[in-house]
Image (spheres, helix red, strand yellow):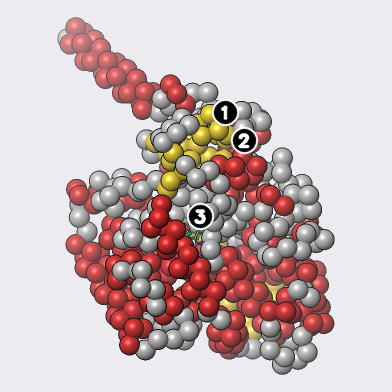
Amino acid sequence: MPAVHSYVLSILYAIALVVTAALYRFTQPPAQLRHIPRIPVWQLCVSYLSGEVEEQRVKRILLPFANKHRADIVLVWCFGEWMVHIVDSKVGRAIMENRSLKKQQPPAHMLFWQLTGRENIFFSDGAQWQRHSRIFKAALQRTAPMEQFAALARRLCALVGDGGRVCWNDLAHRFTLDAVGTTVLGYDFEALGRPEGSLITLYNRVMAAVADPLYVFVPAMERWRPRRQVRKELDMLVAGLSEIMAAKKADPGDDVITYMYEEPELTYKELRDNTIVLFMAGHDSTAGSISSLIFLLGLYPDVQARARAEVTSVLRPGEEVRAEHFTQMPYLRAVLLESLRFNNPANVTLPRVADVPVQAGALTIPPGTPIVLNMSAVLHNARLWRDPLVFDPERFLGADDAADGGDGEKGNAESWMPFGHGPHQCPARNFAMLEQRTVAIALLRQYKWSIPEDSIHRKGIRNAFSTFTLSLPYDVNIDFTRI
Ligand code: HEM
């Protein structure tokens, strides 16, 4: 009997040894990457398994590690793949401007592709991307979203009514759906008026399924356990959006899709793929930014009072807001820039790869290595910002008065990059800034607001888990009082 016992034990030891060795090998970077400071894999695994959001992982693990090693780039293990994360703005700018970098394409069998297609500004490359980028920017320039945003802000205020407690992230999300619907697609989803509208509920359901972490991190799941119902709903959504596009052709308006239609160079497939990615890119990130902005104004009553005093000194009661008013509101601008730094909506860029070595300061990144600009790290790096975890709009006052988005803290202009950097940086940042300004101004003129004592965000903004690493605050309850 003892002989059988020790035989079984030996087999178990052998298995444990093989598994440990396999795990060790699986979590070791290839030899050519070992010169890059690497975040301990066990810390990352604990973080992933606990469902920690990207922005928290950056503040708790990545930045302390990078600063201890005085590193501008760090190696991060992510579900079997090693990626370089850039945490410094100077290195980030140089790399993101490097034309030999291309966007890495996500695995082919992900359901995501069935929704977005590949022939769009997000996933195309080379000459095709240049064409899409040029056409989209020109179309965006021709639209005049200001009036549209102001009208939607009025609808939003009607919902806040005489005040009371409001679930703000929900309203922000519905506002941005309507903003992107009316100005980009030329279609009113009426998310503010009818949140249960069929296309909106269908969209929310499909997006939740497409972003299911199990299927995103293990794309082969789509082959092992195909989701027929989700596919059916996805087809219905695409058909719904295609109908909107077809109606646009017959009845043009003042919207991005109408202007893109006028471009003989775009095929129908390209137009369809662009419509869908613009719709997707256009609202979640902006909803996150509007949620954070109004929350922070509620959390800091002095900041809110100062912003209100500025707005009401520039605008007479009932006066329509116009773009030229914005230059007279430097404090509001500083609040916006700081809010986008403090809880930046997009945490990392899409991964890039190059087929040549890429220089990152003193280190060389070998060809084929996925590289991301970690915007959260850059915007909270203590080597770049004083008191990065403190919300302080003053840091942007007196900064160079260049167009919004291009500037930053005095002497630190290059580190403000919530919209990315380089040729692929967000082409709609002015559009997104305008949405935030319009909402903030409308609310500041009509309401005072505060954060309930029992808010889950009192000790720091809590963002929902997002497969696409966006920072989207949840359960943001705000108490509004009409002035
Ligand atoms: C606060 C709101 C927004 C934030 C923080 C944001 C952030 C970003 C970032 C960081 C990128 C670069 C991604 C990368 O390099 O991989 C990007 C790209 C992009 N964004 Fe935005 N975005 C916002 C709003 C919008 C809106 C409203 C639209 C459309 C109406 C939009 C459309 C796009 C497009 C088309 C790209 C791809 C550009 C390219 O690859 O050439 N974004 N955005």
- Residue 263 pos. (x, y %): 39, 73
Q: Nearer the viewer, residue 440 or 353?
A: 353
Q: Is residue 410 above or below residue 322?
A: above
Residue 115: % across, % down: 31, 63
**Crowd class of label 1 (few under 14; some 14 to 19; many from 20; radius 10 Å):** few
Hey, what amino acid is under mark 3? His
Disc 2 to disc 1: CB gap under 8 Å: yes
Q: Nearer the viewer, residue 252 or 330?
A: 252
- Establish whether ligand 1 lies closer than 8 Å to the Cβ of label 3: yes
Q: Which residue is labeled 2 in the image?
A: 72
Residue 169 image offset from top left, x and y in percent:
54, 70
Residue nearest the viewer, comparing 364 with 457: 364
Per the image, label 2 sits on a secondary structure element best described as loop
Residue for badge 1: 363
Q: CA distance from mark 3 to mark 1?
A: 24 Å
Indicate the secondary structure of the residue bearing disc 3: loop
In this view, the residue farthest toward the front is 264
Question: On the rendered image, what quadrant is the C terminus found in?
Answer: bottom right
Please indicate whether residue 170 sits to the left or right of residue 265 in the image: right
What residue did someone put label 3 on? 424
Amino acid type for the residue under numbered disc 1: Leu
Q: Residue type at mark 2?
A: Asp
